[in-house]
Image (tube, rainbow, N blue to C red):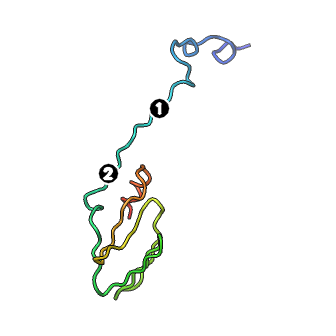
């Protein structure tokens, strides 16, 4: 019969003093979500481009072609009266901050 730490000998690791491993955890810090300086600015739309905004779906048509994009719910897209498009965060959490940086 082999005598090792797995078959009954007490090893130094099993005799360690301190809290049980189940009590060791990681604390999440609250992350302050800031918009980037570039992300705060509204997007200017040229006069030869048409925009159709339906909820989170944005369709853009111009002289170079068409583009359609569906934004996630964490990102709010709105068209201002001056013809500008504003992209902002709908929620204040980490995922919204990440999504705002992508769009």
- The vertical placement of 59 against 5, above or below, is below
62, 55: nearer the viewer:
55
User: Which residue of the protein is positioned furthest toward the right in this rendering?
Assistant: 1
What residue do we see at 45% from left, 77% from top? 68
Left or right: 21 with respect to 65? right
Q: Residue 84 at x, y = what percent? A: 30, 74
- Give the side of residue 48 with respect to residue 21, left or right: left
Give how far apart the Cα atoms at labels 1 and 2 are.
Answer: 24 Å
Q: Quadrant of the C terminus?
A: bottom left
User: Looking at the image, which residue sits at the far front?
Assistant: 81
| Quarter-of-image position of residue 32 | top left
**Is 41 drawn above or below residue 68 in the view shown?**
above
**Dot 2 surroundings within 10 Å: few (below 14), some, or many (20 or more)?**
few
Q: Position of residue 72 (x, y in %)?
A: 47, 63
How many numbered discs, if any? 2
Give the secondary structure at mark 1. Answer: loop
The residue at which mark 2 appears reads as: 34
> Counting other residues with Cα less than 10 Å from the Cα at mark 1, is it few (<14), some (14-19), or many (20 or more)?
few
At a point 45% along the width and 73% down the height, the residue shown is: 69
Instruction: Indicate which label's residue lies in the foreground, 1 or 2.
Output: 2
Q: Which residue is mark 1?
A: 26
Where does the N terminus fall, quadrant-wise?
A: top right
The residue under the point 42% across, 59% down is 90
> Which type of secondary structure does the marked residue at label 2 adopt?
loop
Residue drawn at (70%, 14%) of the image: 2
Q: Quadrant of residue 46?
A: bottom left
Choose between 24 and 77: the one closer to the eye. Answer: 77
Q: Is residue 59 left or right of residue 40?
A: right
- In the rendered view, does 54 fall on the left or right side of 5? left
């Amino acid at each position: 019969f082999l005598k090792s730490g797995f078959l009954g000998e007490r090893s130094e690791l099993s005799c360690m003093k301190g809290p049980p491993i189940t009590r060791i955890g990681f604390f999440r810090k609250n992350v302050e979500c800031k918009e980037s300086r570039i992300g705060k600015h509204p997007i200017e739309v040229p006069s030869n481009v048409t925009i159709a905004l339906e909820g989170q779906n944005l369709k853009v048509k111009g002289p170079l072609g068409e583009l359609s994009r569906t934004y996630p719910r964490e990102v709010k897209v709105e068209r201002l009266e001056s013809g500008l498009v504003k992209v902002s965060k709908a929620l204040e959490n980490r995922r919204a901050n990440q999504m705002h940086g992508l769009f």
